[in-house]
Amino acid sequence: MKKSILITGGAGFIGSHLLRLLVNEYPETNFVNLDSLTYAGDLKRIDDISNQPNYNFVHGDITDLSLLKILFEKYNFDSVIHLAAESHVDQSIINPFSFAQTNVLGTLNLLEIAKEFWSKNFNDKLFYHISTDEVYGSLGEEGSFKEIDPYKPRSPYSASKASSDHFVNSYFHTYGLPIIISNSSNNYGPDQDYEKLIPLVIKNIFEKKSIPIYGKGENIRDWLYVGDHVRAIELIFKNGRIGENYNIGGQNEIRNIDLVNQIIKICDKLLDRPENSSLKFIKFVQDRKGHDYRYSVDFSKLNNEFGWNPMKNFNEGLQETIKSYIDKLKTIKK
Ligand code: NAD
């Protein structure tokens, strides 16, 4: 295992799950979590590891090049796992500039600093960039995204992530920087921000508020349990081939409306409400601009190379996830 790893965005949803796994599993490795704590970042997510001797938190921005320089000098990183990003498609439609700033320029800063510090010896170094399947665009009823597919991003969010992926690849081809990229489907699990679909639906059911659903709710997403995602990241980080990208999928394709119906069923049961009584909160709203119809991820490369499969059964994962939010919402209400 590497000795000193910079993790960006570790106070976010996926970053916090990843940090918990790595900090506990690799006590000999020093982890630095660099996070600017935007509205989406919350250190409470990783309260449980904050006092571990191999964990450090730095409150700072990846767009701050001078700070990155200081951190590379101080901690002598041999790897970067880069998750920090503006991550919500709806926000990107409202304010695309912050997406270009963080996702594109922030990533470019990190690449530049890693190149500068590692240029004498790229051996045993790794810049691992975490990205999304949304860079591939939108699918019809058939097919799944493969690593060799062309990028066709359609929202400002996916355009910014696609752009950052291109920069990461360009640093490999131009300078020989050792990089890996992984592109995963939609994550779900405990501790996600309430702006995202699953937590939002649970919160609104709990608070007896309307549940906004874009269009007719027919768009299809592939859902990956966050615990399965961070396991895949660990595997790729340790064994992935330099210069490659790996798709990570959940094998759980479901229409938004069917997902919401499933959440309602589980929530009503957990909240001791009559079955399906929360169906009345569903409110169909004007479709998201440029709404991608379907995502589906072919992760056979990851499976063939490392035997990785998503382990979490979707019904179980959803049940556990919903319970975790309801427990939390109940304590907030008290
Ligand atoms: P998140 O929004 O929950 O967390 C992002 C974190 O980055 C937050 O803690 C935030 O404070 C931090 N951050 C934002 N801008 C920053 C900046 N300029 N400098 C430093 N820190 C900054 O996101 P997430 O859902 O955990 O996603 C993590 C990564 O995984 C992102 O790169 C995202 O594109 C990618 N991804 C997410 C999903 C998903 O379903 N959530 C799926 C595929 C890929």
Image: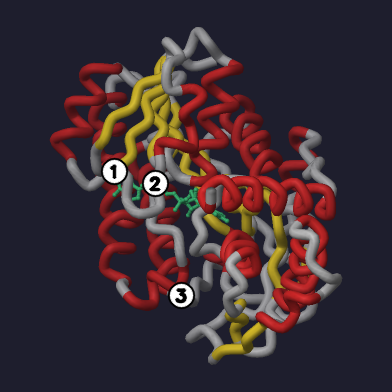
Q: Residue at x 64, y 63 (%)?
A: 202
| The one of 18 and 268 positioned closer to us in this rendering | 268
Query: Which residue is under mark 2?
Result: 41
Q: Residue at x 34, y 77 (%)?
A: 94
Residue 289 place in picture, x, y as percent: 48, 86
Q: Residue at x 43, y 67 (%)?
A: 157
Q: Is mark 1 within 8 Å of ligand 1?
A: yes
Task: Give residue 159's mark.
Answer: none
In the displayed structure, does residue 110 sit left or right of residue 222?
Answer: left
Query: Split into 4 quadrants, where in the image is the N terminus?
Result: top right
Query: Which residue is under mark 3?
Result: 155
| The one of 106 and 60 positioned closer to us in this rendering | 60
Q: Is mark 3 within 8 Å of ligand 1?
A: no
The answer to which of marks 1 and 2 sits earlier in the sequence is 1
| The one of 243 and 162 positioned closer to us in this rendering | 162
Residue type pointed to by label 2 = Gly
The answer to which of marks 1 and 3 sits earlier in the sequence is 1
Residue 138's quadrant in the figure?
Answer: bottom right
Placement of 45 over or under 77, stated as above or below: below
Q: Residue at x 42, y 10 (%)?
A: 53
Q: Is mark 2 within 8 Å of ligand 1?
A: yes
Task: Give residue 36's mark.
Answer: 1
Residue type pointed to by label 3 = Ser
Query: Element under label 1?
Result: loop
Residue 329 place in picture, x, y as percent: 58, 52
Residue type pointed to by label 1 = Ser
Q: Residues within 10 Å of mark 3 (few under 14, many from 20)?
A: many
Q: In the image, which is nearer the foreground, mark 1 or mark 3?
A: 1
